[in-house]
Image (cartoon, rainbow, N blue to C red):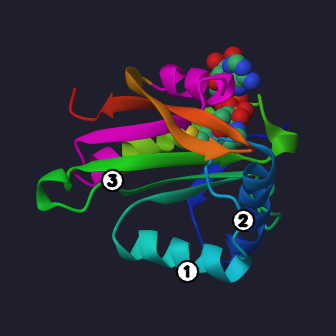
Amino acid sequence: MKPISIRPVEERDAAAICGIYGEAVRTTVSTWEYEAPDEAEILARLRGIVGDGYPYLVAEVEPGEPIVGYAYASRWRARSGYRFTAESSVYVDAACRRRGVGRALVDALVDACRARGLRQLVAGIGDLDNDASIALHRACGFVDVGVFRGVGWKFGRPLDALWMQRSLTG
Ligand SMILES: CC(C)(COP(=O)(O)OP(=O)(O)OC[C@H]1O[C@@H](n2cnc3c(N)ncnc32)[C@H](O)[C@@H]1OP(=O)(O)O)[C@@H](O)C(=O)NCCC(=O)NCCS
């Protein structure tokens, strides 16, 4: 694969994000959403995240071609005291996995969050058998914090959530 370049999201990326996320919604428990959002909803969410001042990055292989992955940070909890902590999310096109795209995105997201003065990133991993996500986050410096047992439900079964954390201050 050609070198991956990481850039800030643009509104024209919404269609590709919609496709990547929709596949994850329909086929995985990495997200506990049941219905894949349409492009308008993805665009509204994107605008909300960028409007709140959080980084939203995409991975491009060929300039002008649809992006192959994305990662963003978003508000974790609403109370003021949580404002230096954000939650991270990362999704890579199923056809482009295990080629370093996720790693490039999360490493760049860590840098972008630190540059914005954030102090901690947290990631909620569903479920415990999401080996790819757990290994990716560990590779990017996240450490395991703890497991909430049975807090999710999808595809007719209960799901666990592994919470991981990356300090941005060390
Ligand atoms: C998790 C995900 C983003 C990883 O993206 P990716 O581009 O395939 O990851 P990378 O190629 O950058 O892998 C980085 C490291 O993560 C680990 N890793 C990635 N996929 C793995 C897998 N299937 N099994 C075990 N380890 C894996 C490896 O340590 C890998 O480094 P290596 O290839 O040098 O061994 C991707 O699998 C995905 O989009 N999954 C569905 C959505 C999801 O689970 N998102 C996370 C929500 S919290």
Q: Residues within 10 Å of mark 1 (few under 14, many from 20)?
A: few
What is the number of the mark on residue 44? 1
Residue 61 in view here: no
Q: In the rendered structure, which segment of residues is drawn in magenta?
A: 113-140
- The residue positioned 77% from the left and 31% from the top of the image is 99
Disc 2, disc 3: CB below 8 Å?
no
- Helix, strand or loop under label 1: helix
- The residue positioned 72% from the left and 65% from the top of the image is 35
| Whole-percent x, y for residue 81 in the image | 11, 54
Q: Which residue of the protein is positioned furthest toward the left in this rendering?
A: 81
Residue 29 among magenta residues: no
Q: Three-letter amino acid code at disc 1? A: Ala
- Give the Cα distance between marks 1 and 2: 16 Å
Q: Residues within 10 Å of mark 3 (few under 14, many from 20)?
A: some
**Pointer 3: what residue?**
76
- Helix, strand or loop under label 3: loop
Please state if 87 lies on the left or on the right of 27 as rendered. left
**Pointer 2: what residue?**
35
Q: Three-letter amino acid code at disc 3? A: Trp
- Give the Cα distance between marks 3 and 1: 18 Å
